[in-house]
Amino acid sequence: RSFGGTQVSRTFYARGQTGQQLLLGAYQALMRQVDAGNVELHARHEMLDLIMEDGRARGVVVRDLINGEIKHYTADAVVLASGGYGNVYFLSTNAMGSNVTASWRAHKHGAYFANPCYTQIHPTCIPVSGDHQSKLTLMSESLRNDGRVWVPKKAGDSRKPYDIPEDERDYYLERIYPSFGNLVPRDIASRAAKNVCDEGRGVGPGGLGVYLDFADAIERLGRKTVEAKYGNLFEMYERITGENPYETPMRIYPAVHYTMGGLWVDYDLQSNIPGLFVIGEANFSDHGANRLGASALMQGLADGYFVLPTGLGDYIARTGDLGEVG
């Protein structure tokens, strides 16, 4: 299918669920190992510190977020897979527990931080709905293949979207960027949405939203076809907002989604601290300004499936028995 910034179909996908399928696949693989007794899972724990001995990473100190208990775990090596730094912006599409504190605590022990060159702002997120949210919800970019983005032409127009006639709507991406229309690159779509909201033409609570309208697609393709392509996303949107996107346009607004840059690693995914390995978004190694689910798949496969098992095994083989941590 096509994505923002391209005029050809260049990415494989699983309906609007590509990232979700990656997540479920990884989680199922993890839980198989938990069930086999090879992995011990400690949910709702936060890393407080990195345990160092003789210049090597030898474990972590953690806090149980349920009862506050502080515990430590020692090992021959440590792997950080704690995500990127998106939550420095407070609300992002990441869970609040997926933040940069683990990387920061490793950095304080001398782990290099490298190349924080880019933060991906995702244009199709469900807008903020209140003061007590912990995260924002990402809607797939695939929606922009058929959804049309618009706002009222007049500032302060509080009518329901279906009460606003066509000649009083501004399909601003189609107007400003006729070659790409609603499939402009993500950064352009995000800035354009913020600009129209800054002009007072935003919709929904606080005026921080724009419409993503499927009425034309439903009329052109039929509801069954739209449902086959995006039904899971429409259902998720309705569960969160209480609005039926088949009957009223979705509301979207930009949100921080992915960060480039993180702890420096070599080709074996080892940081400059011996024994500290960093994978996924927590490291600096895999980039792409127009990042898609396809590159998340690449990073998950490259780091977790191919590189880490070899690099980690090589490190343990070279260091031999490190003994108990003193």
Image (cartoon, rainbow, N blue to C red):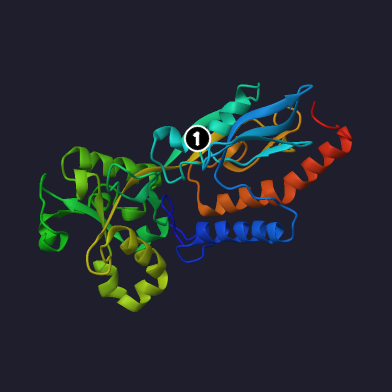
Give the image location of residue 280, x and y in percent. 61, 43
Q: Which of the 4 quarters of the picture holds residue 107?
A: top right
On screen, residue 114 versus residue 33, left or right, reads: left
Is 190 placed above or below 37 here? above
Q: Secondary structure at mark 1?
A: loop
On screen, residue 204 versus residue 319, left or right, reads: left
Tally of numbered discs:
1
Whether residue 272 appears in this view of the structure is no
Residues 92 and 77: in front is: 77
On screen, residue 85 versus residue 237, left or right, reads: right
Q: Which of the 4 quarters of the picture holds residue 322?
A: top right
Q: Residues within 10 Å of mark 1 (few under 14, many from 20)?
A: many
Is 145 placed above or below 217 here? above
The residue that appears at 48% across and 34% down in the rendered structure is: 118
The residue that appears at 27% across and 69% down in the rendered structure is: 246
Residues 77 and 282: in front is: 77
Give the image location of residue 159, x and y in percent. 10, 56
Whether residue 118 appears in this view of the structure is yes
Give the image location of residue 113, x and y in percent. 59, 26
Disc 1 residue type (three-letter): Tyr
Is 78 placed above or below 326 here? below
The residue that label 1 is drawn on is 85
The residue that appears at 69% across and 50% down in the rendered structure is: 40
**Quadrant housing the C terminus:** top right
Is 231 placed above or below 256 here? below
Residues 72 and 127: in front is: 72
Give the image location of residue 97, x and y in percent. 50, 41
